[in-house]
Amino acid sequence: MRLVHVLIPIGKTEAVLDELDAEGIDYAVSEEVGRGEYEAQVSFPVPTSAVEPVLTRLRNVGVEEDGYTIVLSAETVVSKRFADVRAQYTDLSLSRAELVSRAEDMAPALSTFVVMTIVSAVVATTGLLSNSAAVIIGAMIIAPVMGPAISASVGSVLYEPKLFRRGVGLQVLGVLLAIVSGLVFSLLVKETLLVPPGFNPIEIPQVQERLTPNILSLVLAVGAGVAAVFSLTRGVSSVLVGAMIAVALVPPAATVGIGIAWNAPLAVLEAGTLLLVNILAVNLVALSLLWMSGYRPVSEESTGYARKRTIQLLGIITFALLVLGVVLTVVTLLSVADAEFKASLNDEIDAVLTQQEYQNVELVEVQIDVSPVQGVLFSEEPEVTVLVDSPGGIPPSGLAEDIRSRVREEQGVNTIVVVEAVDASRPADDEATITERVVIPVRPVVSAL
């Protein structure tokens, strides 16, 4: 419910009250003595969804569009006529003025936005590197990302250029801040040895979740956009919805920073694609739902401008999403190819180790340093490292070549194979067990053709 206060221009009181009577609305009228151009003030309670149509009718009989009007939340209304009015307006949507005011309030001041974005990105990066979902969720709660996305959509639909520009600007700034914050913090962690040598963040499950984008990734972004518009237009709490949008944006941005810090270009491509898809999907859904909900500028001229701008934005975002959808599909196929290569590689190595000459050798670990997909994308040779348990900690002669030949025959991939060996039978405190590692690299044979 809302309590509306309106100042009535001189000579318009009778017409305004007639409109309120026609709607069956209770009101209280008092004389206005503070401003010469107004003769009275009228206050009346209405359902939330009735604010916009009632104000429109009052404007049609002389109330100024930009005149003195206040809309407040009302806890309780005791009136015989109010129940009849509420029955006429069953919709729960906010008025235009309230929508703009709420969107402006959701986009914080620049200094607050910058600080909270940096803090949330650093905390999210910490959660990703420590594989802690709880820490990541905490970062999402403080991330101020919902306001800019909603502000841009509201500014476009209602033709509020200042609100639109501010929303777009904060979105761009927020993404850049999140990536840079994740990058700087990751470099700090890496260079100060807060993680062990050889630490590979790309293998962390929470990071990998942001490196395997697919078409299903759109579900989170679309759901976040729907929830954001619903919470905005119905005037309900946006805290949890803001966290939902942040989940779609901040962790992928932090993952991009992690990928840059650890020189993982494929990870940057995958996380960056997911980030762009989520940003565009949230904006597309918000724009579409606000326009379909019937929100328009007050004047017909502004409505034409708003329609043109909104259609242009929807077209641009849709085209960009289609392009990124192709990239997303390609990335998905590449990820599947990498997974299949890894699974097949283990099978090939196991098959080699079943040979008689390797009966005393056991496979400990396989690490793909450069996958075939990465080799194609970044002009690098595929490379794998195989760690085996071998007597004396010495790699068996010919094992690397046998593995390479087997992989080439079965998968058609020339691969650099590096074999490292340990002897698990030695005592744990035997320093030689830790330090004695023999590496045998075998380069693929490149055909003259």
Image (spheres, helix red, strand yellow):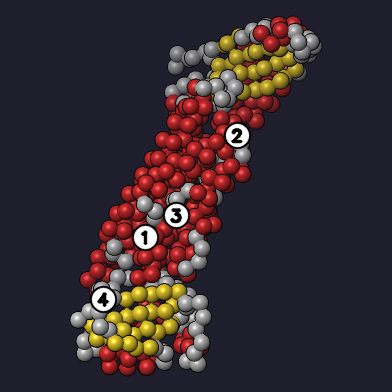
Q: Is residue 164 above or below residue 301?
A: above
Q: Which mark is residue 123?
A: none
Q: Is residue 45 above or below residue 427?
A: below
**Camera-side mark, 3 or 4:** 4
Secondary element at image label 1: helix
Name which residue type carries label 3: Met
Mark with earlier residue (3, 4) = 4
Residue 264 seen in the current view: no
The residue that mark 2 highlights is 130
The residue that mark 3 highlights is 146
> Residue 301 lies in what quarter of the image?
bottom left
Q: Is residue 234 above or below residue 44?
A: above
Q: Which mark is residue 67?
A: 4
Secondary element at image label 4: loop
Residue shown at 55% from the left, 31% from the top: 202
Q: How far, Cα to Cα, is label 3 from label 4? A: 30 Å
Mark with earlier residue (3, 1) = 1
Q: How far, Cα to Cα, is label 3 from label 2? A: 26 Å
**Camera-side mark, 1 or 2:** 1
Q: How far, Cα to Cα, is label 4 from label 1? A: 20 Å
The residue that mark 1 highlights is 104
Secondary element at image label 2: loop
Name which residue type carries label 1: Glu
> Residue 265 lies in what quarter of the image?
top left
**Camera-side mark, 2 or 4:** 4
Q: Position of residue 199 (x, y in %)?
A: 58, 24
Q: How far, Cα to Cα, is label 2 from label 4? A: 55 Å
